[in-house]
Image: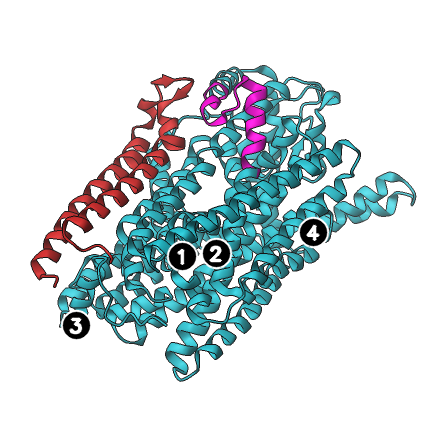
Chain colours: A red, B cyan
Amino acid sequence: MITKQTIEAYWRENKVVMSLIMLIWFVVSYFAAIFASSLNSIIIFGFPMGYYMGAQGSIATFVILNYLYSMKMNELDKKYGLEEE
Amino acid sequence: MANDAMKAWSKKLRQIYGVYTGVFVLFVIALWIGESLGLSQKYIGYAFLFGTIGVYAAIGVLSRTSVVAEYYVAGRKVPAVFNGMATASDWMSAASFIGMAGALYLQGYDGLAFIMGWTGGYVLLAVLVAPYLRKFGQFTIPDFLEERYGGKLPRMIGILSALIVSFAYLVAQVTGVGIITSRFVGIPFEAGVFLGLAGILVCSFLGGMRAVTWTQVAQYIILIVAYMIPVIAISYKHTGVPIPQVMYGQALQVIESKQKTLINDVKEIEVRQEWKKKADELNGRIKGLPDTWQQGKAQLEEKIKSIPSGDPEKAKIEKALKDYPKTPEEAKEKWTAAMKEAQAMSKPPKSYVAPPADTKGIINFLALTFCLMVGTAGLPHVLMRFYTTPTVREARSSAAWALFFIFLLYFTAPAYAAFARSEVLTNIVGQAFTALPAWVSKWAAVGLISIKDMNGDGIIQFSEIIIKADAVVLATPEIAGLPYVVAGLIAAGGLAAALSTADGLLITMSNAISHDLYYKIINPNISPSTRVKIGKALLLVVAAIGAYVASFKLAIIVELVAWAFSLAAATFFPALVLGIWDKRMNKAGAVSGMIVGLIITAYYIIGSRFYGVDWFGIKTIAAGIFGLPANIIVALIVSRLTAAPTKELQEFVDNIRYPKGAVRGGVEE
């Protein structure tokens, strides 16, 4: 039997995970774009960092975020006994 | 499915696609050997075209089905990795495959809005929507809207938005199929469209979502192999290291330093002044319309009379007369486009890596990125794919895999663009017109590159080269000096990208009509087999309408696709996310939100594109930036002013929020 408390606690933790992921998502895409011209003065392996964040850095972060989210949620499911049979 | 059965099934799939990839590689190698033994380019083109379409059709035949759950959601047994590949090729269209690198080449930093927008949306999708849709577990997005909000109205709005958003997109894919087949195999555009559609239809018609899924996996493998080979070769040629994604930093440095020297180059300035003159002249002609249109026409007609027949000049003028705008309105459209091009060419090259310098530019960049991200997470044909996984857990992991497979291509696109630009700057600029490389003349012949000695010095200046976006990916094999087989491979990849997306869209639209409209609203008493039959019949109808509209080759189609993102962002996305994350959201709120979002977005799109409406300088393409927040605000306010959803509905929301157990109302068939 799943109690209301379990669901609420599960959902609270889910919201924390969601907010963290959305925060990182926002920073690597929008902040990186707003500060792109200052970031461009840093050059690594020929890549100006402002351009690099838009072209590759942000999207690599997105992939990692989705992977971490999937892992973390599987853990949460187990912790609260809400995983699929 | 039980766990062990699932594992065995995944293993079997891995074996099948492993063998398939091997056979495909052998096929390419065989054609390559054939080419070196003298096989003509025409037959290589045919082999790629018929070979790949044949494979897709065969998969369709092998996965034919009439069972409802198989037809609509592939039996819900697509493992995460494979659903990831299918979603990736469902998602990546001809525009991603051929146009993306070109947009980066032409726009520099500004083009990155597409890279971030079309990948960042998958984070929203994975975290906010996909797992919950899977838990809900029916067949379509309108299903969810009706179940969550109650009543037929939310479903109707869902159907309408799905059809509007998907149709423009479908026409663009069908056009893409026609262009690729006609360019590479030399068959007429219409025949190419017909052939491509036949391939799509055999597949979706026989096997619905099941066949579409397994074909999309096959198409992903072809498109990613095709995308990687040329750029790896060019990276090796330029830098000696075959890892383009890491090595194009060098190309960026070359671009920046070369472009700096061009800003004050005397010859370049000369050419830019020529462009300026041309722009001014066109501007004068546009201002003088319709008289200038009359005069231009009369002049050509006069000229043609004065030249004796048989003179080669005569054919030239006949062609000019044939291409001359038919009406003053057409003249205005054409001349304005030419003037804008001339104006752009009259400016010195701006830094390739610098973001927009003015606030308006930055705001538009951010707004566009945002609309593309949210729109991606609201496109019905992508959302549908998450119904096909066996579990919620697999839906989450499949969103991660989908993004990974998309990432492989998008991570590489900037390298294509940078290598192509550095090649143009180092090996073409400064050459004599008599020493043009072969690839330039080849693509100039079909109009993808235009190059003209504006200042008459016999030397190519940077400002004299106009490259169309599509040329970047298409010409890379020749720039890198690869055999023709690779060009054929690129064509097969572009075709796979267009066909896979068209497949997903066709099935989304036919389901919206057969399942959502006919079965759920008009006649709920039909048998499952009749439902599938109606769905199949509609596939043919929608495909035929799509092909018919594509045959006009309307220029507006490309714009329509971009607008689809704003529309999806302003309608579907808020209704889905609020439905899951806000328990207090009710029917009145969601419906009024969707209607307001749709109206505001459509108003701004039409107003800013055709009637000069301008809010904060936002461009038409980012219209969703107004509709989306309007939708959310209206939905929140209206829902708080009206009665809370019933206790059952609130329990339903609770229920879709965690993976365990079945969902009330989620009838499995």
Residue B410: image location, x then y, percent: 45, 37
Say left or right for B669 vs B654: right
Q: Does the CB distance between marks 4 and 3 fall below 8 Å?
A: no
Q: Earlier in the sequence, mark 2 or mark 3?
A: 2
Instruction: Look at label 1 and name its amino acid.
Output: Arg
| Vertical arrangement, residue B333 with respect to residue A62, above or below | below
Report the disc number at residue B385.
1
Q: Earlier in the sequence, mark 4 or mark 3?
A: 4
Name the residue: 50% across, 50% down: B217
| Secondary structure under the numbered disc 1 in the rendered image | helix
The residue at which mark 2 appears reads as B213
| Secondary structure under the numbered disc 4 in the rendered image | helix
The residue range painted magenta reads B226-251
Report the disc number at residue B294.
4
Instruction: Look at label 4 and name its amino acid.
Output: Gln
Instruction: Look at label 2 and name its amino acid.
Output: Thr
